[in-house]
């Protein structure tokens, strides 16, 4: 069912959604850019639809809204422990088709990989509802079409801003509020069908030859192992554990889980000093292969959803899209 | 030929090696020049000079090889340039068609600032222009420079007043993944103000100089930019007596404070300058009066705010070129 809303009507809708939900969207975070007098498009709670940035890609992905960067799992004191409490409110997130596909990738690794689902992921994930933002135009670094992630049907509602109105296709009305505040209107969400950059995704890489491909040395010489590509990635899920012993009373403390990155020093450090991937080139190879080969072997879909955020974030201008394309073209070339 | 050298020099024309020729000095506040003014500079150099300009260390142009007789005509030609670079930014010049009204107070120079540079904390040209508005036209020989961050690419430490941008970094521990990029970088390129405590970062505010390197290196925006502040260094100089690097007078000062200090400097100079000399450089006045008197005059009617730190002493270092002071006959 489609609806149209004036800003005032959509804001009433939001106000009522917010009674039982936290509503997150990409917004302009004033002055939060890396450089002075620069803004950042990132995720935060919204109260008004005018705050939502429709015409830019968010720098960070939506995953931080339901998979916190730092999350306390439990607290301990002597022999006792207490599980952390999470807000029981729903979580509504404005995000793109590729981002929703990325959440589906996170679900695979967090919920379907192994004997039992990840409890701490699941307890927030079960509250999550999607509002997909239409993509009428592709942004510069997007390559979702090549990855097959440019569309989705997995959403409660869609939204786009057009001629002063907010147009929404509602699949699962949340508490009947979309119908209550909207005026019926024929809407179907719009998704891009082509990107400015099309990428040749390799189909069946020969692991032995990939492993010794000289491109990893080249990327290794360029990469500075800062990890930006992984923290902005909507499908990266790696985390590490930190046990904190409070300074005042080291018998008390907490266990936290915090995002980690395969590019950053220490990620593969083992007890005894061994480290699997010491060079930045090896780390790049590991990440790329996970994104476009290994994950698919296990789960049937590529982990990379082609959002291009890693391209935007890399301070060394390394493009994952270009890297994938090189591997794809080499593969085609090698096959004749 | 009769020339009033003092008037000529005050009008930004030079006395040169060649008795018949002068040289015009054009100031570009903040070093940012709309290129529409370049044809005028070219025209003056080609029609009246030797077809070349010297790009000065103070971000201006000197047009050499001009006969003294053309000064009045060229001053009139300069009007649009003076209008654009001085009058338009709020500098009071009564007769812009008669050339520069003074030359003692030198052009305020600036690094390229945050229009281009990733390190710069603020718009250096904008501050340079605001300072120009306060201190120009003026006769005392004063050099002021503005730089966007503690790297000091402009070498403000060689100036009477040097202004360096500082940013107060804000830390959101929830966003920190403990990668230590900020910590390692701070130790490598800055003051080592950051340490890791319980996997999160602690900042020693007394060591932090506000360079913003932590913000630049943070992958998750756990570090972001807070307020803009300024370090004010003073009485750096070159010269034949005692060249020296400027000493910090204030740090974490607000913009309004910086502007007020620039104004107060001229009150101090006027009060204490040795008028028996043809000119006295402000640094030597401070050497004579001492820091306490300088400080008192500079801080008159200045509200330093809660963040600013004031130097208790001026810690200068630098060679003494006077052999009677610094060498013994052996």
Image (tube, coloured by chain):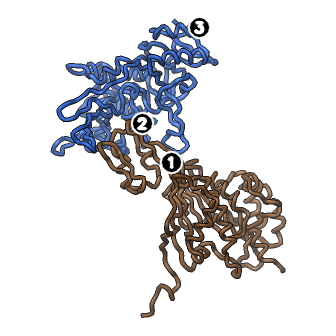
Give the number of the mark in front: 1 or 2: 1
Is B152 placed left or right of B138 in the picture? Answer: left
**In-image side of B280 versus B73 (left or right):** left
In three-dimensional space, the C-alpha distance between marks 1 and 2, rounded to whole angstroms, equals 21 Å
- Mark number for residue A183? 3
Residue B45 or A70: which is nearer the viewer?
A: A70
**Farthest left residue in view:** A272
Residue A212 vs residue A140: left or right?
Answer: left
Question: Which element is circle 3 on?
Answer: strand
Percent of width and height locating residue B203 = 39, 49
Q: Quadrant of residue B136?
A: bottom right
Tell me the tag on residue B164.
Answer: none
Question: In what quadrant of the picture does the N terminus of chain B appear?
Answer: bottom right
Residue on which disc 1 sits: B118
**Residue in the foreground of this view, choosing between B143 and B59:** B143
Q: Quadrant of residue A293?
A: top left
**Residues at badges 1 and 3 in contact (C-beta under 8 Å)?**
no
Up-down: is A104 above or below B206? above
Q: Residue shown at 54%/40% (left/top)?
A: A38
The residue indicated by pointer 2 is A319
Q: Which chain has been coloured blue in this picture?
A: A
> How would you rate the neighbour count of disc 3 (Cα within 10 Å): few for under 14, some for 14-19, many for 20 or more?
some
- On the same chain: label 1 and label 2? no
Chain identifier, colour brown: B
Q: Secondary structure at mark 2?
A: loop
Residue B142 at x, y percent in the picture: 65, 68
């Amino acid at each position: 069912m489609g609806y149209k809303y004036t800003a005032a009507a959509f804001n009433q809708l939001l106000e009522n959604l917010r009674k039982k939900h936290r509503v997150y969207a990409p917004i302009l975070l004033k002055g939060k850019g890396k450089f002075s007098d620069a803004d950042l498009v990132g995720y935060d709670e919204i109260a008004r639809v005018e705050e939502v940035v429709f015409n830019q890609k968010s720098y960070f992905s939506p995953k931080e809204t339901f998979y916190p960067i730092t999350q306390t799992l439990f607290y301990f004191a002597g022999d006792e422990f207490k599980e952390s409490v999470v807000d029981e409110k729903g979580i509504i997130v404005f995000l793109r088709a590729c981002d929703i596909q990325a959440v589906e990738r996170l679900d695979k690794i967090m919920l379907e990989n192994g004997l039992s689902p990840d409890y701490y992921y699941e307890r927030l994930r079960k509250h999550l509802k999607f509002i997909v933002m239409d993509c009428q135009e592709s942004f510069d670094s997007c390559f979702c079409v090549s990855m097959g992630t440019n569309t989705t049907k997995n959403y409660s509602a869609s939204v786009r801003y057009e001629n002063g109105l907010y147009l929404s296709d509602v699949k699962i009305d949340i508490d009947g509020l979309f119908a209550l505040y909207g005026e019926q209107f024929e809407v179907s969400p719009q998704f891009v069908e082509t990107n400015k950059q099309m990428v040749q995704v390799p189909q069946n890489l020969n692991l032995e030859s990939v492993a010794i491909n000289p491109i990893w040395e080249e990327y290794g010489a360029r990469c500075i192992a800062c990890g930006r590509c992984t923290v902005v990635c909507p499908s990266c899920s790696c985390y590490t554990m930190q046990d904190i012993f409070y300074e005042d009373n080291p018998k008390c403390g907490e266990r936290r889980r915090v995002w980690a990155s395969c590019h950053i020093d220490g990620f593969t450090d083992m007890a005894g000093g061994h480290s699997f991937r010491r060079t930045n080139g090896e780390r790049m190879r590991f990440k790329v292969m996970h994104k476009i080969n290994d994950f698919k072997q296990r789960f049937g879909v590529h982990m990379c959803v082609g959002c291009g955020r890693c391209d935007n974030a890399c301070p060394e201008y390394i493009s994952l899209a270009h890297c994938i394309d090189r591997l794809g073209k080499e593969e085609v070339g090698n096959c004749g | 030929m009769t020339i009033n050298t003092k008037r000529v020099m005050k009008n930004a024309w030079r006395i040169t090696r060649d008795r018949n020729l002068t040289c015009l000095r054009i100031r570009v506040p903040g070093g940012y020049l709309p290129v529409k003014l370049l044809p005028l500079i070219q025209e003056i150099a080609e029609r009246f000079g030797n077809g070349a300009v010297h790009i000065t260390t103070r971000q201006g142009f000197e047009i050499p090889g001009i006969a003294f007789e053309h000064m009045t005509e060229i001053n009139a030609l300069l009007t649009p340039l003076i209008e654009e670079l001085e009058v338009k930014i709020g500098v009071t010049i009564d007769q812009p068609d008669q050339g520069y009204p003074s030359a003692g107070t030198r052009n305020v120079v600036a690094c390229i600032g945050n229009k281009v540079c990733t390190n710069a904390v603020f718009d250096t040209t904008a501050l340079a222009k605001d300072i120009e508005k306060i201190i120009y036209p003026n006769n005392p020989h004063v050099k002021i420079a503005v730089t966007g961050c503690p790297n000091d690419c402009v070498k403000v430490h060689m100036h009477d007043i040097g202004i360096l941008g500082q940013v107060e970094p804000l830390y959101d521990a929830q966003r920190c993944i403990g990668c230590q990029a900020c910590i390692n970088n701070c130790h490598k390129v800055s003051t080592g103000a950051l340490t890791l405590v319980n996997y999160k970062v602690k900042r020693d505010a007394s060591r932090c100089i506000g360079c913003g390197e932590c913000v630049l290196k943070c992958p998750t925006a756990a570090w972001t930019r807070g307020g803009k502040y300024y370090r004010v260094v003073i009485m750096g100089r070159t010269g034949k007596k005692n060249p020296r690097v400027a000493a910090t007078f204030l740090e974490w000062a607000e913009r309004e404070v910086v502007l007020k200090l620039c104004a107060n400097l001229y009150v101090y100079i006027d009060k204490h300058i040795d008028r028996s000399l043809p000119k006295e450089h402000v640094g030597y006045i401070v050497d004579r009066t001492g820091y306490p008197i300088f400080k008192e005059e500079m801080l008159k009617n200045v509200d330093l705010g809660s963040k600013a730190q004031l130097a208790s002493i001026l810690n200068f270092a630098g060679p003494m070129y006077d052999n009677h002071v610094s060498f013994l006959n052996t």
